[in-house]
Each structure stands twice: as C-alpha cells, then as structure tokens.
Image (tube, rainbow, N blue to C red):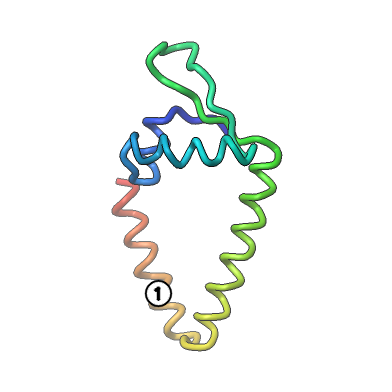
Amino acid sequence: RTLTMSVLADRIVFSVPRLSYRIGVLVERGWVDKLPCAEDKRAHNIVLTEDGARALMRAGRDHREQIRAVFDDVLDEDDFAALKTVMEKMRAAVDS
C-alpha cells in the first residue's frame, strides 16, 4: 500500500508532475497520504489510506461490472477466449 512517487508514476505511465497534481487531489479526499521517504530525502511515499482502499475496491467493482456489461452484449465465448489470449500476450510483453 506504499510506493514512492517515481515508482507509482512508472507503473501507471504518468509523468511525475502530472502524478503530483493527481496525488494532491487524492490527499484532499483522504484516499492517500503523501509522506517523506526515510531512505531518500528527495522522494515521497504515497500511502493508500483505509478510505482510499475502500474507494479503490468500489471503483474496481463498478468498473468490472461496466466492462462485463459491455463485453457480454458484444462478445461470445470464442471472442472472450481470443481476447484472453491477446491480453495474456500483452501482459507478458509488459512484464518482460
């Protein structure tokens, strides 16, 4: 539940300045805390709060339901199998 700003920016493919603005919004909502990094005085750690974890779980659940509804209306089982194969290849490429 804790990442440095630079690691988080890399993971979500944001620039650090762009992420810094968004983190400010999340801090105001009480969803994350921005704390000095003990190991690197130039860095900040972003810590997900309990409220932030609940909001993330709600957003993930809502997102999955919306995606599922759209995909179920358009794709059949063969399409889902093909999509799964493509997504697994993309994930492997990103992870390597």
Please report the residue visible at 42 percent of the width from the left and 38 percent of the height from the top. Answer: 21
Name the spot of residue 23 as percent of width and height, x first.
48, 37
Q: How crowded is mark 1: few (under 14 residues within 10 Å), some or many (20 or more)?
A: few
Name the spot of residue 2 as percent of width and height, x first.
54, 30
Q: According to the image, label 1 marks what residue? A: 83
Please report the residue visible at 34 percent of the width from the left and 43 percent of the height from the top. Answer: 14
Quarter-of-image position of residue 78: bottom left
Name the spot of residue 32 as percent of width and height, x first.
59, 35
Residue nearest the viewer, comparing 96 with 42: 42
15 lies left or right of 79: left
Please report the residue visible at 42 percent of the width from the left and 30 percent of the height from the top. Answer: 5
Name the spot of residue 39 as percent of width and height, x first.
45, 12
23 lies left or right of 53: left
| Image position of 54 with respect to 45: above or below | below
Looking at the image, how many numbered discs can be counted on the residues?
1
Amino acid type shown at disc 1: Leu
| Image position of 9 with respect to 33: above or below | below
Where, quadrant-wise, is the N terminus in this rendering?
top right
Residue nearest the viewer, comparing 18 with 86: 18
67 lies left or right of 92: right
Please report the residue visible at 55 percent of the width from the left and 40 percent of the height from the top. Answer: 26
Residue nearest the viewer, comparing 4 with 96: 4
Q: Find numbered disc 1 in the image and state the secondary structure of the residue it sits on.
A: helix
